[in-house]
Amino acid sequence: MSIHILGIRHHGVGSARNVEEALAQLQPDIVLVEGPPEAEGVLHWAAHPEMKPPVAMLAYNVEEPHQAVFYPFAQFSPEWIALNYGATHQIPVRMMDLPLSHTFALEKSKEKTTPDKSTDKATPVKPDDNLVLDSPSGIQPHPDPMAYLARIAGYDDSEWWWEHHFEHNYLKDQAPAHFEAVALAVEALREQVITPTEDRDQLREAYMRRIIRQAEKEGYARIVVVCGAWHGPALLNLAGTVREDEKKFKGLPKVKVAATWIPWTHTRLGLFSGYGASIVSPGWYEHRWLHPEDLGIRWLTKVAQLFRQKKMDTSTAHVIEAFRLAEALAALRGLPRPGLRELNEATQTVICFGDTVLLKLVEEELIVAHRMGKVPRALPKLPLQADFEFHQKKLRLEVGETRKEYELDLRKELDLSRSRFLHRLEILGIDWGHKQRAAGKGTFKEVWRLRWEPEMLIKLIEMGIWGNTLEAAGSRFLLDQSQRGQSITEVARFIQQAIPAELFAVIEKLLGRINELATISSDILELMGALVPLVDVSRYGNVRKTDLSAIHLLVEGLVTRICIGLPNACYGLDEDNAQKMFGHIRQVDEAIRLLENDLLTQTWYQTLGIMLDKQHISAVITGCTCRLLFDAKVMETEETARHFGLALSAGNEPAYAAGWLEGFLKGSGMILLLDHALWNILHGWVASLEEGHFVELLPILRRTFSRFDVGERRQLGEKARRGRVVSTPVNRRTQTVPDHFDPARAERVLPVVRQLLGI
Amino acid sequence: MQSVLRQHAEQQFSQELEELKKQDTHQRPPNWHLSPAAILTYLMGGKLKNGFEVTPKYIGSRRLMEIAVATLTTDRALLLYGLPGTAKSWVSEHLSAAISGDSTLLIQGTAGIGEEAIRYGWNYARLLAEGPSEKALVVTPMMTAMKEGKIARIEELTRISSDVQDTLITILSEKILPVPELNTEVQAIKGFNVIATANNRDKGVNELSGALKRRFNTVILPVPETMDEEIDIVQRRVASLAKVLELPAQAPSLKEIQRIVTIFRELRAGTTQDGKTKIKSPTSTMSTAEAISVVNSGLALAAHFGDGVLSAHDLAAGLVGAVVKDPVQDKIVWNEYLETVLKTREDWRDIYRACKEISL
């Protein structure tokens, strides 16, 4: 019986090659791989022909799916090699690590004791073992231990050191020596430099030992263990630690854990993605894996091809010169062969003329190399996930890592379904699609920008508790949210979301909820805020072929409530609140005009009329109502002029007058240009102000007038220079008619003109 | 030799080069005086095995210097590119001193030079008297470098007019210099290479043609990354220049250098060091080289007209001159900077007042 421990670096190309070689040499009858034992049920999928790395093993807490861990694998991951070896040689593969059921439970209990940890609860838990060996538990208890060795060897970066010594220097048929060297290095580190690792790690290593012992007991003769190099030395002493280890497992808390495979992306393997720190250059690693013999020429040729695709002249001579420089650099640095650093520098110096900007392109396209894995279709899935995939395929929406834009024409059946699908996902918090502003093409156009991220699958699994189809889950989720929400505006927003998602069953209930809230709500601003989205929604009816009479009813109810409550709500507001109310009144007015419901419009203007005559309503609001009534032609010009004069008359505080003016004129001063009567009143008022008052009012007046556009302001200025306007334009026009004009002859033309115009 | 105003790099640092040569065990490219590794040590500084200390010549990224040296080992020409005052010529001089032991094969690029400055010229008296012959030929540094297998330097390559620039193409790609009048050619000996410098900020530059650009490996020298790096550069250069010029002044205090570097960095970056205030940048380049000369002229003032200690007053004159290159725009920028940034700094009062006096 023999136990072989292969200490690796996760995603290390050299490690992978050595593992491959060692496995072929050792011919094990069982392979133990570092990873969660819960995943054993899905391990056999690794060898499925449809499985295309990068993929990740996803393990999650069944009760709270957001507590999840990924174990990503690229095709050059040593663990992936081990899994595949097991599957192709028909020998058992087991995962050996502390079961996640314990890990999750421990984390949860820790969370409870340290309350401030809850802030980052939303982000998925850091994966344990896709990390480089330097951070075995996500949290780094000690600074990178490898850095210690790297420093001794004169490297400033431990990654580079490891890479040069253990990954890039792969020598054929040297696997045993390689693993021996790794084990020695780590052992020395663990013994002398770094104090034994923290509790969690000890627990994990104890569990690893337990699984090895178990395999031994079952009579396997050649056991191969593939684990992070850091753990290697801890797994040697099996016999002496039995009792101690078993003590540790007593009374460990437990939760239920499930595992599955999900597609992963290269970007996620990289550091840029913010978590799951592992490797920065998956594309380069993949290249090294696929072309181990390449010293850099093939890579540089790829770079050159990329530049050519982007319409940049890059010749073969460039490649040759770049390669020569890379080699010279490697020689200068005492490296056996150019690494990525040398190749990049050569590319920058020779091909990019020293510029770093173009190198970004190489980084994105080649060094990270956008790639997305695939998992077998037959993989057992949660019903919601299956429903998602069914629709996604049916609607021909591509799940890809790169951004893609779809322009949907909602008059087409397919596009409408797509839009519905994306809206449903949005409700569930899966932000795969981001709706873009469609440029002025009417309401039947929607532009979506799609970018898939693997975390969205977790969200999907998490949302699985709400229902088995997107429709059901979306409906229930919205309902639940609305039951919790106390604000009408919020519920109104849900309705706004539910309509394009066509969750009609919910809409009715949401409307009921709004009604409920509206009845008990005394906050008129709330109601006003809710009205705007609802009116927007009621316009959707045409495009979406849906019956929205319920909404109309609700809107009517809301308007009525607003009309009753508004005058009172406007009493005695301070400056800030008056401004807020002012904004709301204008929005509601706009919404009501959109509705084109005569009865409601009438009620609304009546209410405004009432407010106009009330005392103690803020001047801004009175001015605003006056203007709205004037614009709607409910109030005649003379009447408006009267109010205008009243507001600006000498009896009022100048501040009141200025406020009123602001309310009346907000937005546009065109009215002053066209209406001479109002102009004259304003002109007179300004002229009558005493100097002190005038200076006092300047800021308010400036606030009002500075918002007009430049042309208006100029015209106003010119008009002001001319002073009062006394001309009577009507008379002048009659005078332009010459004396010899014969009306009878002129009228004879009219029938023909009518015919031409089709009147 | 001490009376020379400015010594060549290979003279000034002859001892260092000598020691490096003794200790050098790596392989040398043909006709190189030192191995690439030793050249790096010469540039970046370090301690030799026998304890001899080599001073750093270039303060900044080691990797850039590695690229530069590696380029020269591949027979590709090196183009040092960057803003004015980023030590391009300095690096070029030291590189050629270390590689060929000779930094004097220099062609200064100006708008006025013609082909004969790069290829060869004629001694017309002789040409008329004796007809075309080797003796009538006026040899250029470029030709010498080719014949002797040394490094030729071209300063300010982009100031040379485009058609003259292009005469370099044959030299760089074929490594020959034809002399059709004598029906002969000069073939470059191993060890020959060209280091050119060019800057991308100055007015009146001629862009390199694509053909020429392809024959160079380009290394862009950046402005110093950190404050400490820049202070280090200024301090070292000021100290060595003061020694050469024999200024009877005390070495400037670290505080003064810090302030000058801060002012330069802030104006260059357009924000204050704490990143809180945005300021305008002047049209001048605000390079490290200028910072060095501000401190130097300040030292000279202090030595000859002051009490020998560098004070804010001594610095102010040079400072204003360095910042205000355009009398209208830069003046506004500078005054704004004075009033909004310098004035608010408690212990910068002296420099504020000194600048204010001059600016008025």
Image: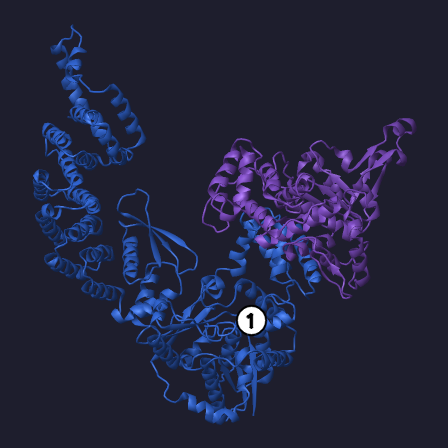
Chain colours: A blue, B purple
Residue B349 seen from this side: yes
Give the number of marks: 1
A277 w.r.t. A524: above or below: below
**Amino acid type at image mark 1:** Gly
Query: In terms of depth relative to the viewer, which is nearer, A291 or A253?
Result: A253
Left or right, residue B250 beside residue A566: right
Q: Is residue B297 above or below residue A1?
A: above
Q: What residue sits 71% from the left and 31% below the top?
A: B112
Mark 1 neighbour class, 10 Å CA radius: few under 14, some 14 to 19, many 20 or more: many
Residue B195 shown left or right of residue A299 in the figure = right
**Residue A476 place in picture, x, y as percent:** 22, 66
Vertical relation: A188 (above or below) B101: below
Q: Position of residue B47 (x, y in %)?
A: 73, 63
Quarter of the figure with residue A173:
bottom right
| Viewer-nearest residue: B203 or A705 | A705
SS assignment at label 1: loop
Given residues A720 and B198, the one toward you in this image is A720
x and y, in percent, of residue A226 in the image: 53, 80
Judge by depth and name the residue closer to the eye, A460 or A690: A690
Quadrant occupied by the C terminus of chain A: top left
Q: Residue furthest front?
A: B307
Tell whether A31 sits left or right of B191. Answer: left
- Residue A617 position (above or below residue B22): above
Residue at the limit of the structure toward the top, as seen here: A740
Chain letter for the residue marked with disc 1 in the picture: A
Quarter of the picture containing the N terminus of chain A is bottom right
User: Residue B335 at x, y = what percent?
Assistant: 50, 37
Residue to which mark 1 is pinned = A12
